[in-house]
Image (cartoon, coloured by chain):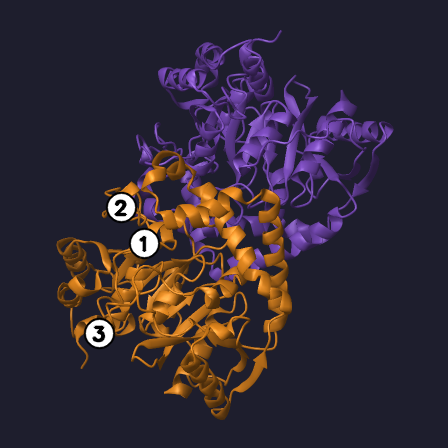
Chain colours: A purple, B orange
Amino acid sequence: MKALNQLTATEIVGAIADGKTTCEAVTRACLDRIAEREPRVQAWQFLDPELALKQARALDRASTRGPLHGVPVAIKDIIDTDDMPTAYGTPIHTGHRPRVDAACVAATRRAGGVIMGKTVTTEFANFHPGKTRNPFDPTRTPGGSSSGSGAAVGDSMVPLGVGTQTTASTIRPAAFNGCVGYRPTWGDLRCAGVMEAAGSLDTLGLIARSIEDVALFRDVLLGEKPQPLAGPSSKAPRVGFCRTHFWDRCDDTTKKMLEDCAAKLSRAGARVEDVTLPQDFERLPDAHRWISSFEFARNRAWEIDHHWEMISETLRKGRINDGLTCSFDKYRESRAFAERCRLKMDDLLEGYDVLLTPATAGEAPVGLNATGDASFCLIWTTMHVPAMTLPLFTGPNGLPVGAQLVAKRDADRQLFEAAQWVTRAMS
Amino acid sequence: MKALNQLTATEIVGAIADGKTTCEAVTRACLDRIAEREPRVQAWQFLDPELALKQARALDRASTRGPLHGVPVAIKDIIDTDDMPTAYGTPIHTGHRPRVDAACVAATRRAGGVIMGKTVTTEFANFHPGKTRNPFDPTRTPGGSSSGSGAAVGDSMVPLGVGTQTTASTIRPAAFNGCVGYRPTWGDLRCAGVMEAAGSLDTLGLIARSIEDVALFRDVLLGEKPQPLAGPSSKAPRVGFCRTHFWDRCDDTTKKMLEDCAAKLSRAGARVEDVTLPQDFERLPDAHRWISSFEFARNRAWEIDHHWEMISETLRKGRINDGLTCSFDKYRESRAFAERCRLKMDDLLEGYDVLLTPATAGEAPVGLNATGDASFCLIWTTMHVPAMTLPLFTGPNGLPVGAQLVAKRDADRQLFEAAQWVTRAMS
């Protein structure tokens, strides 16, 4: 029997329903894990054990049980909570206490989730890192910007974490911390109460330790009655193996693990074909740069005008400078280019259930002053397609490396089912 | 010479630059107008004359001058301000004081605008009205949901107002109050710090008393150096006269005024043709209903769970009930249908610079318990196209009636230039 803090959300809900444990016991086990590991990992921006236990005890007394009954959830600190501060990763907002829960937080509570605390984000969900370290090796980055949610789930402090993704901010930390990470089809999950980085790219991101948990949590956030997935026995998927234009940035071992994976899936019965992205997709990093920076700089006008000196140089000289110098015409051309690529992507994905592609260039890099290469995520982010990273590989230093699966827009559940199939085929 | 409170924003900026007046004098004139008229109109949710004057005096002392230097601006009370409360049209949030200015407020201040105060919104920018009355006839609605911004600009209390539009919330109050109203191409103007009603439809909306002012304010919000429009001497536009599927809802006088307008534009040199929308556009009101309610109900989860009894019955039994009972599949089908219609709309608009279409069914209706028919706006809102209402007509009771012009996505400036041409042709 696994320790309570190691259970998945689905297992927790089942164990509580069966009377084998309580909400309080689960929350306490997670708090114990945090107490043990937090000095090393530094995943939490705000944690009040008593507040978490209070929620858990109230759930134990409650007469109704939601689909996340008793499940502790970590919330990225750019997402508003009505009972905990939210500081958006910047000293400008230290101690800020929102009035209202973000839509995703309220939906989580409604389903019986325990809002465990707020997890570390990079500054305004951008590149300047917070204090979190990779739980597998504290000299390495946990990835960003959902750094704390990735580390907390990967280190078994909580079974579920909420992050966001504007570039690589969920898939990358999920991969670096050995988690299942999911970025939904753009527009599906409401972002009210979540700091807008660049609205035309932003989504929530879910981090878990199983595919089933991601599917469950997504249904909760959609306000749907949770529907079980078809399971790993579903039909073998049609897999496109997509190295992308950035393949040369991958470590040799990552390349080999992905190529071996493609071969293994083929042997297991999947139809696997190489897929090459259209040549002009090379320009997507540029388009992403101008779209995200134009929107970000306008969204942060208040902070720029009132607290310029409290913004990191990384952010000022990077995204903010990009955004303030980007003309509306350049922004609009970038946006139109991205939209044309999305239509091409729809066509390309007609022939496949999923693409298999790198999640990151390799293991989490050494160093805490950056969050790792974002190239392998930003294409899919800009395409608005759903993506999932699976902790299928172990790198040369013993750290987790993810395999990313991508599906066409609106095919999120098909993505999960293909991910189940792939996971079984690789096990 | 017009009184200072009757000047347009462009005229104010010019008069101050020429040393003919000061920021303080303009603000004071607007405050005087408000003091005189507010008991009757009730446009303001929050107004602190001393705070407005303090901003104006600081601008008079400033060494630099932005493109809105000294222009008083009304801000709809679903838009956050760091120095004034923001209550979103609901007693749930009375007295709430946001920490940060919304992106559009910060951009307005940066350009030298005076944030005059907060204008009345319907409850959560939905259907349940606030206290505002139509300044032309206090027994009639000012329209909604940007009720106060429409009434304040129409009644010469301020030259510029910011609203939002998810259905008809800018075009309708602008039309009912005799203003120029503009809803931009969806996605152009950042909404950070603006309450999200339904993000896939929401935009800001600008209300003014001249087309030039709208163009100026839009450039400010985009962070662009303001560019003058080509002016009314530009080329005669290709006009599609589009009665829509809702034509029968129009008053006879409104029908006649629009038909006469089409004929007059033709005589003035425009190529005018009747345009019929594709038959399946009849389903757009349904699609709009499910998209907006699905998103709205999820965004308001916190208020639903904590303050159900403080939400109006109109909202509970209407949009919230719709949203909570709408499945994700139904939502997604509606969203996909809307997207298909957008592509058809792009094709249809290839042949025209603008469509001429009703802004409302007629004059503002008598009664303060509703905000008027939204049919003539929701199509264009759902299509994500830019739209502008022009105060070209006077109805049978002497109240203003708007003519709406609509252009293809991204053709906002062409829309303004066509609107100038149309205004001159009709004068």
Task: Say which of A71 and B27 sits in front.
Answer: A71
Q: Which residue is mark 2?
A: B82
Residue linked to disc 3: B6
Q: Can see residue B35?
A: yes
Q: Chain of mark 3?
A: B
Q: Are marks 2 and 1 in contact (CB under 8 Å)?
A: yes
Disc nearer the start of the sequence (2/1): 2
**Closer to viewer: mark 3 or mark 1:** 3
Subunit bearing disc 1: B
Q: The residue under label 1 is which amino acid type?
A: Val
Q: Earlier in the sequence, mark 3 or mark 2?
A: 3
Question: Badge 2: how crowded within 10 Å, few (<14), some, or many (20+)?
Answer: some
| Amino acid, disc 3 | Gln
Residue at the image position 47 percent from the left and 56 percent from the top? A326
Mark number, residue B105: 1
Quadrant of res A410: top right
Amino acid carrying label 2: it is Asp
